[in-house]
Image (cartoon, grey):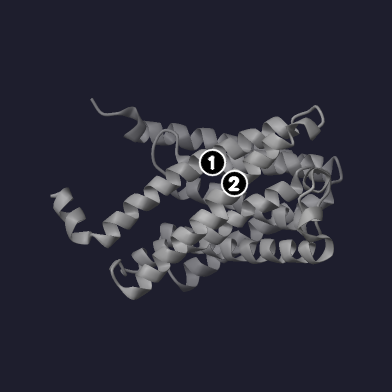
Amino acid sequence: MSRPSHGPNAHNKAGSFFLATLLLWFLSVWFEIVFNKRTQLLCIVAGACFFQIANWVIRFLVSRDPLFVNTSVSLLHSTITSVSVVFILVNQYLKNSLDGMFQHSQLVGSAWQWAYPALCFSCGYFAYDQLDMLYYRLYNGLIPSILVHHLILLICVTLALYRNVTINYLILTLICELHSIFLHVRKVRRMAGFRDGRSKIMKVEWFLNWTTFTFARFVPHVLITVKLIVDASKFKRGVELPLALFGMAGMNLLNAGLGIDLYNAFVREMNPQKSSHDRE
């Protein structure tokens, strides 16, 4: 008997569920914009439109392969977001120093300059990417981790934007996009046919991949989680702390899975003969 998680029926069920959640999210955003006059949330729409236009440009000029197009747009987003986050952090450091930046009141109750529109713009990308993956079925399994990842991000980010809280915490989590750059570079490189992991260029790429995974994804997310726990008593009663802890728990679990996948991919590329023998 075949496993239902790998069959087309399971594929359709997963797609239907995540499409429904995306539609609810879309209606929620437009309700806030139209009825609650939250025009600053139009940056979410601008972000989604920007990356969809980038999708069309790449599809028209470079390749029509859905996975290549999706990965290329993801690389564009990671690059833009990384530059934006570094700019925001450096700008804030020059203004308030490290001590002032990481006070609880700063991280929860206010937003650094440019942080709110930058977060909205990235939120638009998450919605675009979710829809693109659903449309072209760029996911696998009954509970696709990439779709779960985007759903968690959309829930946490949009609720924070609605309530205008923990904006700076979320900007800190986006430091992980520095690592995502090299994830997407590796994926595009492999799709282009360059797979010799023993070459000098690939070794440099893997060094940057592991370095940014450690210092831009794993360590920051762990430290953010610790900071939330240490400052738990400073949060007001409400959904902010539970939602933040839930979001970071999900992110840390996904990071652990990503680390395992990265290690397996690293072993395969460094030992191509051994991996070929194992498959035989």
Q: Is residue 115 visible?
A: yes
> Marks 2 and 1, Cα distance to the nearest angstrom?
7 Å
Q: Is residue 138 visible?
A: no
Give the number of the disc on residue 274.
none
Percent of width and height locating residue 263: 36, 51
Q: Tell whether 4 sits left or right of 181.
A: left
Residue 267 to residue 61: above or below: above
Label 2 or label 1, whichever comes before in sequence order: 2
The quarter of the displayed image where residue 163 is located: top right
Residue found at x 74% / y 36%: 231
Q: Tag 1: residue type?
A: Asn
Residue found at x 74% / y 34%: 240
Q: Is mark 2 in CB contact (under 8 Å) with mark 1?
A: yes
Q: Tag 2: residue type?
A: His
Q: Tell whether 151 sits left or right of 111.
A: left
The residue where tag 1 is placed is 252
Residue 56 to residue 163: above or below: below
Percent of width and height locating residue 235: 79, 33
Residue found at x 60% / y 64%: 53
The quarter of the displayed image where residue 1 is located: top left
Q: Which residue lies furthest to the right in this view?
A: 37
Circle 2 Cα neighbour tier, 10 Å, few/some/many (<14 / 14–19 / ≥20): many
The residue where tag 2 is placed is 221
Circle 1 Cα neighbour tier, 10 Å, few/some/many (<14 / 14–19 / ≥20): some
Secondary element type, mark 2: helix
